[in-house]
């Protein structure tokens, strides 16, 4: 038991000091546990172009704003869209346990559809969140294996 505690400590230390680099093409950030998940929503489809309408929400100049009477007004409380999606005043958009942080210029319309700052529809915004969580889980597993190998190497050298 006394030998087990230092091994666990060294595994955690090695996992945190991993100098591996991620070469994925997407820039994603995942915050665990399951209630705070953020992902970059850069997959775009040019089939629908956005035009502002009453009740739409935009993240602009670091503020979340809602369209009221043909003008963008700063949000002071959370907004629930027609499909049950909730937009918070910090730009976080949540559906069930999935969350997406709006980037500068991105819009969520009253129906819950996402648009980028150029007005093009963002397709599969929620699917991107699921993919990011899956990728993060894989990365954690890989880091744990790598840490285990480093610890084995350290103990093999001491013998």
Image (cartoon, rainbow, N blue to C red):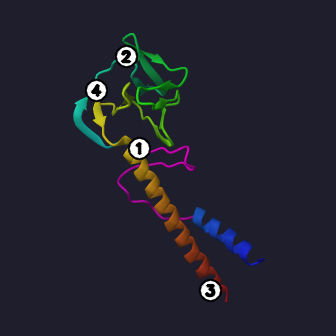
CA gap, disc 2 and disc 4: 13 Å
Residue 150: mark: none
Residue at the far bottom: name it.
159
Specify which label sits upstream in the sequence, 3 or 1.
1
CA gap, disc 3 and disc 2: 67 Å
Circle 1: element type? loop
Q: Looking at the rendering, in which quadrant would you find the N terminus?
A: bottom right
Circle 3: element type? helix
Specify which label sits upstream in the sequence, 2 or 1.
1
Circle 2: element type? loop
Q: Is residue 51 left or right of residue 145?
A: left
Give neighbour class at mark 1: few <14, some 14-19, many 20+ (Cα, 10 Å): some
Residue position marked by numbered label 4 in the rendering: 50
CA gap, disc 3 and disc 1: 42 Å
CA gap, disc 2 and disc 1: 26 Å
- Asked if the residues shown at circle 3 and circle 2 are in contact, with their CB atoms under 8 angstroms apart, the answer is no
Residue bounds of the magenta highlight: 17-41
Residue visible at 48% across and 30% down in the picture? 86
Residue 156: mark: 3
When asked about the image quadrant of residue 118, the answer is: top left
Q: Nearer the viewer, residue 35 or 148?
A: 35
Residue visible at 64% across and 66% down in the picture? 12
Q: Is residue 79 above or below residue 150?
A: above
């Amino acid at each position: 038991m006394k030998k087990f505690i230092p091994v666990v400590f060294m595994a955690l230390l090695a996992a945190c000091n991993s100098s591996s680099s991620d070469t994925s093409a997407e820039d994603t950030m995942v915050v665990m546990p399951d209630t705070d998940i953020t992902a970059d929503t850069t997959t775009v489809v040019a089939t629908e172009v956005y035009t502002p309408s009453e009740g739409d929400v935009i993240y602009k100049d670091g503020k979340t704003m809602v369209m009221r009477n043909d003008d963008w007004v700063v949000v002071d409380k959370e907004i629930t869209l027609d499909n049950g999606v909730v937009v918070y005043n910090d730009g976080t958009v949540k559906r069930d346990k999935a969350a997406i942080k709006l980037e500068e210029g991105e819009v969520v319309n009253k129906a819950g559809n996402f648009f980028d700052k150029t007005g093009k529809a963002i397709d599969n915004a929620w699917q991107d969140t699921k993919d990011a969580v899956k990728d993060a889980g894989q990365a954690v597993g890989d880091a744990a294996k790598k840490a285990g190998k480093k610890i084995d190497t350290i103990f093999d050298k001491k013998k």
